[in-house]
Amino acid sequence: MPGTIKLSILRRIRLLNMAGTLNPLLLLIVTIGFITWEAQETGITAAMLSREILIFTLLLSAVFLVIVLKLNGLVSNSIIQPINNMLRVIEQVKGDNFTPRVRVVSNDEIGVLGDTGNTMIRGLADRKRIRDTFGRYTTPEIRDQILSGDIPVDGELRTTTLLFSDLRGFTAYVEENPPAEVIKSMRAYFTAMQQAIRQHDGLVLQFVGDEIEAVFGVPIDHPEHADNAVQAALEMRKSLDLLNKHRAGLGKPRFNHGIGICRGRVLAGITGSDNRQSYTLIGSTVNLASRIEELTKKVGCDILVSEETVASLASTFPLREEKPQAIKGYSKPVTVYRLL
């Protein structure tokens, strides 16, 4: 606090040394001088003089020993106790608990250190709050990669597997139900699907209307990202069945969706304007994954997988090859597989 007396640790130690050495020494010299002068005036014997000096020295030593021990305890506690308090707070901060604060009880270097530590803890708490808020608008993995600077500024070419899903007949559902019911249902659907995707190391890049764009293998590399995408699609199918059973119990209509999976090369990086940016994947693989998802309507199934994805699978899945399908924007028909 400004305007208060500052007693530094070094000054306290010097005062302790003076109290424990210099003061007893001065008192002893003065007392012996006074006794010697008194002996000369009264003419006491040398034996009596020696005995009085010994008794006085013992008493003086005992008194100053008690005083020194008390002063040493006070100085030690004024240093050790605040440091122990700081260590306890630091241990809690290491466990991501940013609520405790260092108790500042002195205006010396330890007090300054405590104030600085409290400022640092508040800064860490603000940083954690920013990270948590940021993590609500993007996946934690992408958030951490962005904050750590591991994502190249100019982007990078990566081989990955993309998954697109889209709810069927959702436009009519929106028009026929109250807004609150629509938002609640979408949140329940997106939550269930995101859990299924994350269960197999996938990341949801974005929710667009009733559509989900998920990626496997970037920005964090997973060698078997194609297998993970197919497993996630199967898990999404199970999760949707459970969600529909719950909705049926509430008298609500079923949800149906289509899922398209495609593996290939993409340009991965941070794009957008100077004021608003996002982690994005660009390339023909992205477009093809979206087109394959749309093919599920034509083929009449819920999950379709590209030929490139099937060729790279390490595990065996129940797949059935469909007839080559013409896709908008592609000159040649595309071979896809139905996931049974």
Image: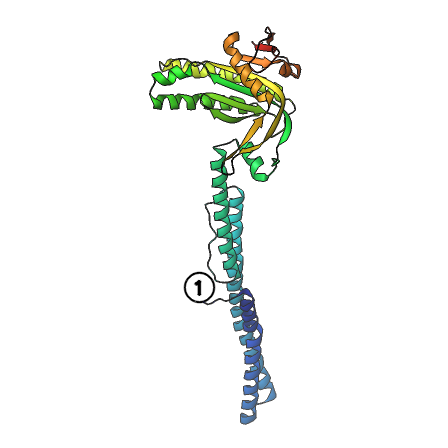
What kind of element bears circle 1? Answer: loop
Callout 1, which amino acid? Answer: Pro
Q: Vertically, is 268 above or below 185?
A: below
- Location of the N terminus (image quadrant): bottom left
Residue 302 appears in the figure:
no
- Residue 262: x percent and y percent? 59, 18
Q: How many marks?
A: 1
- Residue 99: x percent and y percent? 45, 45
Q: Vertically, is 250 above or below 136?
A: above
Return the residue at label 1.
2
Residue placed most toward the observer, 115 or 70: 115
Q: Is residue 311 left or right of residue 5?
A: right
Q: Residue at x 46, y 54 (%)?
A: 103
- Residue 110: x percent and y percent? 52, 59
Residue 287 appears in the figure:
yes
Q: Residue at x 57, y 82 (%)?
A: 29
